[in-house]
Amino acid sequence: MYNTKKFTHWITGGLLVLAGSAAQADVLIYTASLSGGAEAVANASTGFGTATVTINTTAHSMLVDVMFDALMGLTSAAHIHCCTASPNTGTVGVATPLPNFPGFPTGVTGGVYRQTFDLTQAISWNNGFIIAKGGTPAAAESALLAALEGDTAYLNIHTDLFLSGEIRGFLTRDLPEPGVLSLLGLGLGGLLAWRRG
């Protein structure tokens, strides 16, 4: 037979460690569905894709994950643009490296991309964006974070047929589903009731 008091302390301690870890490393996730219809001048591209941008504000890193397929043209560039005047609409200059994300597949109609950027390094940014946003990588990071929170940054993929972009999507914050939060609350409530019992 096990000691329920010890077990409860172990569970409670584990939850506190998880909560502490979450507070120390603020991980923010933003996602976008990419399509031709979402471009500033909508097009009838058969292309589609998804993008996930994960920012760790403690490590000052940004992980970019992109999957795309069925483009009508061959890829020539991809990047994050920031910061439009209004949420989910408009066009604006490039925030990330030019002419392209480092290592992004070019000359293809489909593929995947995964790259981590050190946001403290100027090489992770378009120099024009750094200058426009305060002159330092830290200022550029703050501007991008504000834009991501305000739905005024987008990721797009350019091709030889659509020079200004074949598919794009505005990046929006990925929040936990209300059901997940409810289940967590029920689980914690059950744990407390079990502990008192």
Image (spheres, grey):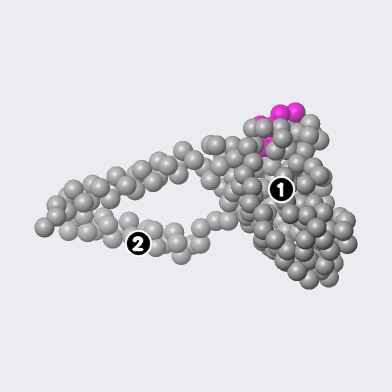
Cα distance in 3D space between marks 2 and 1: 45 Å
Look at the image and tell me whether residue 78 can be seen: yes
Query: What residue sits 34% from the left and 48% below the top?
Result: 15
Q: Position of residue 59 (x, y in %)?
A: 55, 37
Query: What residue sits 25% from the left and 47% below the top?
Result: 10
Viewport quadrant of the C terminus: bottom left
Residue interval drawn in magenta: 135-142
Horizontal side of 113 relative to 168 (left or right) equals: left
Q: Nearer the viewer, residue 25 or 112?
A: 112
Q: Amino acid at mark 2?
A: Leu
* Relative to 131, residue 167 above or below: below
In the rendered image, which residue does mark 2 sit on? 186
Look at the image and tell me whether residue 139 can be seen: no
Q: Secondary structure at mark 2?
A: helix
Q: Amino acid at mark 1?
A: Gly
The answer to which quarter of the image holds residue 70 is: bottom right
Q: Nearer the viewer, residue 160 or 32?
A: 160
Q: Earlier in the sequence, mark 2 or mark 1?
A: 1
In the rendered image, which residue does mark 1 sit on? 103
* Relative to 2, residue 126 above or below: above
Query: What residue sits 74% from the left and 30% below the top?
Result: 134
Task: Name the dominant secondary structure of the magenta segment.
Answer: helix
10 Å neighbourhood of mark 1: few (<14), some, or many (≥20)?
few
Q: Position of residue 76 (x, y in %)?
A: 82, 54
Q: Position of residue 113 (x, y in %)?
A: 67, 54
